[in-house]
Image (cartoon, helix red, strand yellow):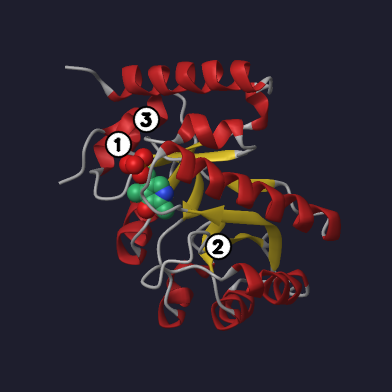
Amino acid sequence: MTTIADNLTQVQQQMLAACNSAKRPISDIELLAVSKTKPIDSLQLAYDAGQRHFGENYVQEMVDKVEQLKHLTDITWHFIGPLQSNKTRQIANNVDWVHSVDRIKVAKRLNEQRSNNITPLNVCLQVNISAEASKSGVSVEEIDELAEFISNCENLSLRGLMAIPAKGSAEQVKKSFENMQSLYQALQQKYSTVDTLSMGMSGDMNIAIECGSTMIRVGTAIFGKRE
Ligand SMILES: *Cc1c(COP(=O)(O)O)cnc(C)c1O
């Protein structure tokens, strides 16, 4: 049986190979371990193997895990799941990053609820890059307005963009990631705080790295299949 530590080593090796072929330094890319639905022991094993960035999708599960691991003070917590405006209060002061902001209403509430006496909440806009009717994410046309709003929120820091492309061929996924890269570069021109392009998961991290991702969100390849 492979262990979580072995899986992490494998993912890091895969990242390194992808970086080499893209001629990028591996230090450009942060590995986010996506631990949704996995027990706290699995997070502890990843932590013991050196992993420090963790991503969760469900508000209550995230709050519970943050509480259970609060003694591990050097974990950086990322909320990456769909966020309804009536749930923002539970995460505004419990996490370091939110990758899934896609509405002004959600940004406004996070800004109001984040304490003034801690560092601003790092925020990525989730972009519905494949324009799927059923999916969350801001449309490409709405990015500017939402980014401008967030940049004026004193308790939020606009860090970049996140996307989950529609399932498709490698070429289709690559096209989506390339579109994200251009949108990201345009945003960087406007805001000096923007330094994060959150894209790439277990199945498409190599393509994402090739297309300029700076943060990959990897679940299955580290923790195994989810139920
Ligand atoms: C579940 C999830 C991931 C991880 O997906 P894997 O395919 O298991 O690596 C990454 N990003 C988001 C937003 C997710 O919901």
Residue in front for this viewpoint, 176 or 46? 176
Q: Is residue 39 left or right of residue 79?
A: left
Q: Secondary structure at mark 1?
A: helix
Q: Is residue 107 left or right of residue 37?
A: right
Tell me the amino acid under the disc marked 3.
Ala
Tell me the amino acid under the disc marked 2.
Val
For marks 2 and 1, give the one nearer the viewer.
Answer: 2
Q: Quadrant of the N terminus?
A: top left
Mark sitting on residue 46? 3
Q: Which residue is mark 2?
A: 127
Quadrant in the rendering for residue 26: top right
Q: Is residue 88 above or below residue 19?
A: below
Q: Is residue 80 above or below residue 18?
A: below
Mark before the other along the chain sequence, 2 or 3: 3
Between the C-alphas of marks 2 and 1, the distance is 23 Å
Residue in front for this viewpoint, 192 or 66? 192
| Mark 1 CB lies closer than 8 A to ligand 1 | yes
Residue 185 placed where, x, y %?
A: 76, 50
Residue in the image at 60% along x and 72% along y: 114
